[in-house]
Image: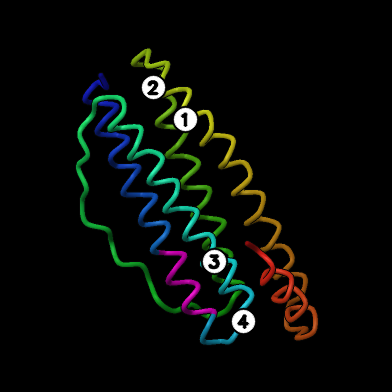
Amino acid sequence: MLKKSVADALNKQVNAELYSAYLYLSMSAYCETIPLKGFAKWLRVQAQEEQTHASKIYDYIIQAGGTIKLTAIDAPKTTWKSVQEVFEEVYAHEQKVTGMINGLMDLAIKEKDSATQTLLAWFVKEQVEEEANASEILAQVKTSGSAGGQLSNLDHKLSKRE
């Protein structure tokens, strides 16, 4: 049975993961309008991945005997100045999520909850990948600057994400 403190924190993370999905879906919609359809596709796939993360925690809470407590999801912003600003926010958001996951791991260690630590170890590893991907794309966007051809090539590359 999950301790209340751990269950509450995990429920909060489910909300955060769903917010991440909502944010990336909003970013995808923005990229559709500028139009950078490859960036839009990458972000839409990212939104789906965040929903999977939320489901993974949701399922764990239930399996561990906890209670699901869904709360309202804040509305994300809908416009950005550029695709560079989008990916600056993606990278900053992933860093924030990493901090949240690390905080959950600290709590699970404090509560001597080995099962939750095992779940969270997967997320710790996942966040290393998430930050690296966001950082790499941001660096490529910055390098391409206003060079339309380079940005177009990056857009094409991102359209291949499945």
Looking at the rendered image, the disc whose residue lies closer to the viewer, 1 or 2, is: 1
Q: Earlier in the sequence, mark 4 or mark 2?
A: 4
| Amino acid found under the numbered disc labelled 1 | Leu
Residue drawn at 38 percent across, 72 percent down? 77
3D distance between C-alphas at marks 4 and 1: 34 Å
State the residue position of label 2: 108
- Percent coordinates x, y for residue 67 in the rendering: 20, 33
Q: Earlier in the sequence, mark 3 or mark 1?
A: 3
- Quadrant in which the N terminus is drawn: top left
Apparent side of residue 85 relative to residue 29 in the rendered image (left or right): right
- Percent coordinates x, y for residue 104 in the rendering: 40, 31
State the residue position of label 3: 43
Q: Are marks 3 and 1 in contact (CB under 8 Å)?
A: no
Apparent side of residue 116 relative to residue 2 in the rendered image (left or right): right
- In the image, is residue 27 part of the stretch drawn in magenta? yes
- Quadrant in which the C terminus is drawn: bottom right
| Amino acid found under the numbered disc labelled 3 | Leu
Q: Are marks 1 and 2 in contact (CB under 8 Å)?
A: yes
Q: Any mark on residue 120, and which?
A: 1
3D distance between C-alphas at marks 3 and 1: 24 Å
- Residue 80, compared with residue 15, is above or below; it is below
Q: Earlier in the sequence, mark 3 or mark 2?
A: 3
Q: Total label count? A: 4
State the residue position of label 4: 36
Q: Which residues are the magenta region? A: 23-31
| Amino acid found under the numbered disc labelled 4 | Leu
Residue drawn at 58 percent across, 86 percent down? 35
Residue drawn at 52 percent across, 80 percent down? 81
Q: Residues within 10 Å of mark 2 (few under 14, many from 20)?
A: many
Apparent side of residue 103 relative to residue 40 in the rendered image (left or right): left
